[in-house]
């Protein structure tokens, strides 16, 4: 029964969201205890001139830091292990992650390793990290993964060619600073992929069997904002209103899925990422409409509400008819930002279908909260539809 359900909400200790809040970094660092800082980022973020903004604000206040800009996309475990070694050899005392989800997840992993010891792969799974990490500040430059507010970090296990996760409340940031001005430089492709990642978080958690009162309100608002503002941010990167609203949407979608859970879109997207090296956001975007279509009968009323939130008129429709309009709305959104939802368009051969099915089945833990059960044959059919 719904009123017997337990609703839990996770979030960082403090979230600051607003245009140009990068200027608040020094004072917030001092509040976390100060000391030598490890600034964790990737070469793309450095090249976009974003790390220099943070570095200048640190220098102005004479705050000591070391730059670790070796993050790779979909970060392999060795990047986290290597960062922890640098943290120790440079005698740092806190960490600032700056970038997309890849940089933020590496920062989270380093924070955990320097207090708990070992290698990051030792901690994959749920609640396997004994102690809190080193003080952690996270600043996203994409909108996005929502990693700045979640208790999970995602890494690539290169030996197994598999994405894996470390799930622990100790991965929550002490302070998240969300400055939409940092996202203005995202090129259209990154804007589209990361924006759809946020949409997948919001939709998957909204229809999840683990949805909570907290995730529902946040997800609804995020879906509405992304449907409205993602095409604007994609079409004109300098549109600061659209960037602002996308930063709001990705942060609240992160809070939503961090307290609600994900589902089959993520499960079926992961193999596309590991086998074909597509970005996390793009693989999620490709699978979204196909899994939504499959899921409708498991949660028609919520999918009907998604149709409304994405601008469809559902008056006079049955719940199932209205739910189907949500799939049409998502396909239209993808078209408007030039993202194909057909796997074949990405050079994947249909002969690879068994490999994809095998990879999808390895993520079956994500089928549990999905609103409709999936068998291996169902997974096969969804991929076939996606071709
Ligand atoms: P990313 O961090 O891999 O960055 C993608 C590219 O965009 C990089 O080349 C980066 O340099 C560039 N970039 C980032 N910000 C930019 C900016 N403002 N201007 C110009 N270029 C910029 O991409 P992402 O999609 O943000 O993160 C993906 C990773 O996050 C994946 O590993 C995924 O699994 C993980 N993830 C984590 C969570 C979580 O809660 N921890 C949630 C979802 C996804």
Image: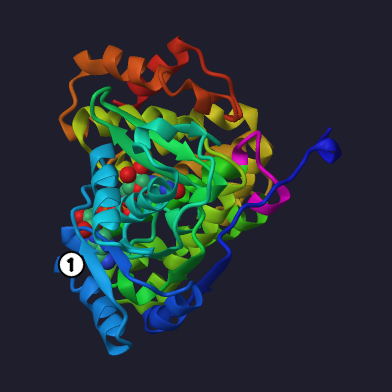
Left or right: residue 338 compared with residue 9: left
In the picture, the quarter occupied by the N terminus is top right
Q: Position of residue 312 (x, y in %)?
A: 55, 53
For image coordinates 49% across by 50% down, the residue present is 171
Residue at the bottom extreme of this rendering? 60
**Residue 41: in sight, yes or no?**
yes
Residue closest to the eye, 182 or 102: 102
Above or below 349: residue 140: below
For image coordinates 32% across by 72% down, the residue present is 182
Left or right: residue 303 compared with residue 161: right
Residue 372 is drawn in which quadrant? top right
Q: Position of residue 45 (x, y in %)?
A: 21, 64
Above or below 14: residue 197: above
Above or below 287: residue 367: above
For image coordinates 24% across by 83% down, the residue present is 56
**Residue 303: in sight, yes or no?**
no
Residue 188 is drawn in which quadrant? bottom left
Q: Position of residue 275 (x, y in %)?
A: 22, 27
For image coordinates 46% across by 50% down, the residue present is 199
Residue count near mark 1 (Cα–Cα under 10 Å), binned few <14, some 14–19, many ≥20: some
Give the extent of the magenta segment.
207-215
Residue closest to the eye, 354 or 170: 170
According to the image, label 1 marks what residue? 46
Q: Please check the rendered image and state whether residue 68 is part of the magenta-colored stretch, yes or no.
A: no
Q: Secondary structure at mark 1?
A: helix
């Amino acid at each position: 029964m719904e009123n017997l359900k337990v609703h839990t909400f996770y979030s960082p200790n403090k979230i600051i969201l607003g245009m140009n809040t990068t200027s608040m970094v020094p004072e917030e660092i001092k509040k976390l205890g100060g000391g030598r800082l490890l600034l964790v980022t990737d070469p793309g973020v450095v090249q976009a001139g974003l790390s220099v903004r943070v570095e200048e604000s640190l220098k102005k206040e004479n705050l000591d830091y070391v730059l670790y800009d070796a993050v790779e996309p979909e970060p392999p475990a060795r990047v986290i292990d290597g960062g922890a070694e640098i943290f120790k050899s440079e005698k740092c005392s806190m960490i600032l992650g700056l970038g997309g989800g890849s940089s933020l997840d590496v920062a989270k992993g380093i924070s955990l390793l320097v207090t708990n010891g070992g290698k990051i792969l030792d901690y994959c799974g749920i609640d396997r990290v004994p102690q809190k990490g080193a003080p952690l500040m996270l600043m996203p430059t994409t909108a996005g993964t929502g990693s700045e507010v979640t208790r999970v970090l995602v890494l690539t296990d290169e030996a197994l060619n598999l994405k894996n996760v470390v799930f622990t409340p100790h991965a929550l940031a002490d302070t998240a600073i969300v400055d939409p001005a940092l996202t203005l430089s995202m090129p259209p492709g990154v804007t589209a992929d990361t924006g759809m990642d946020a949409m997948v978080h919001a939709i998957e958690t909204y229809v999840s069997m683990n949805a909570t009162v907290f995730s529902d309100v946040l997800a609804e608002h995020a879906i509405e904002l992304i449907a409205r503002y993602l095409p604007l941010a994609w079409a004109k990167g300098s549109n600061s209103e659209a960037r602002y609203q996308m930063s709001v949407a990705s942060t609240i979608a992160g809070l939503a899925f961090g307290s609600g859970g994900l589902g089959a879109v993520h499960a079926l997207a992961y193999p596309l990422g590991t086998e074909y090296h597509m970005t996390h956001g793009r693989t999620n975007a490709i699978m979204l409409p196909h899994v939504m279509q499959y899921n409708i009968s498991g949660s028609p009323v919520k999918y009907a509400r998604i149709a409304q939130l994405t601008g469809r008129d559902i008056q006079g429709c049955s719940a199932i008819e209205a739910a189907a309009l949500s799939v049409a709305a998502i396909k239209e959104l993808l078209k408007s930002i030039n993202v194909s939802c057909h796997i074949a368009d990405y050079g994947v051969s249909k002969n690879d279908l068994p490999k994809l099915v095998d990879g999808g089945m390895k993520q079956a833990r994500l089928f549990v909260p999905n609103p409709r059960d999936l068998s291996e044959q169902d997974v096969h059919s969804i991929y076939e539809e996606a071709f």
